[in-house]
Structures are given as structure tokens and as C-alpha cells.
Amino acid sequence: MNATTKTAKKAAKSGVILETSRHGEPLPTYYLVPSWVKGATDRQINAALFKLAASIEEASVDEPWVVQICRETACVYLELGTSRDSEAERGMIVLRSVERA
């Protein structure tokens, strides 16, 4: 099993989802579409993740968030400055705006 196949199996989710960290903090997350990931090469997946992360960075320039990439699950997620629901919702709005672009 190659790395792309492993990524495709782990990437079962799709789109923008509000996940929760193991510490209970909200993590607005954007998953690449699993069917696309399954047929893509590692370089294509990496390029898509970096492009997505760059778009999220540009859309959230005034926020104190850290944009993170997870290759294993083919997603990009936000580490928020606080655990407030209002900040999590702002993060979700940014991710949804990038998703539509």
C-alpha cells in the first residue's frame, strides 16, 4: 500500500467540518474530497493542500489563527486563538468562503 492509498483511506470526510481537538478545543477543518484524493498523486495532494492553506491564510489575515496542514487526512485546519464559539464560527465562515471560491 503506497502513501497515496493510505491517505485516501484516512480521508473519509469531505468539505468544511467543525472538529474537536483531543483537548476539547474547536478546530475548523477543511477536508479534500476523498474521491479526488484517491486518484491523486502525493505531489498533487500536497499542492492542493498548500494552495488551500494559502487561500485560508489570505482570507484570515487579520485573525490570530495558525493554519495547519495534515497530509495523513488530506485536510487543512485552523488552530484558533481562543476556544470561544464565536471565534470557531468565524473560522467556519472563512473556510466556507474559501470552499466556494
Image (cartoon, grey):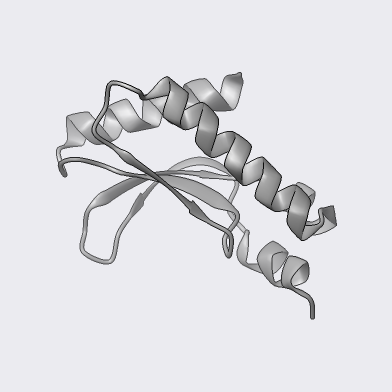
Whether 85 is drawn above or below 20: the answer is: above
Residue 33 visible? The answer is: no
Residue at left offset 75%, top offset 66%: 4
Please provide percent x and percent y for residue 67: 40, 42
Residue at left offset 52%, top offset 38%: 53
**Front one among 43 and 82:** 43
Total marks placed:
0
Q: Can you say which quadrant of the picture contains the C terminus? A: top right
Res 29 → quadrant: top left
Q: Can you say which quadrant of the picture contains the N terminus? A: bottom right
Whether 66 is drawn above or below 13: the answer is: above
Please provide percent x and percent y for residue 57: 43, 30
- Toward the bottom, the furthest residue is 1
Is 76 displayed left or right of 91 in the figure?
Answer: right
Please provide percent x and percent y for residue 98: 53, 25
Residue at left offset 48%, top offset 26%: 96
Residue 7 visible? The answer is: yes
Please provide percent x and percent y for residue 76: 50, 46
Whether 22 is drawn above or below 18: the answer is: below
**Front one among 32 and 69:** 69
- Toward the right, the furthest residue is 39
Residue at left offset 62%, top offset 59%: 12
**Front one among 72 and 33:** 72
Is 53 displayed left or right of 43 in the figure?
Answer: left
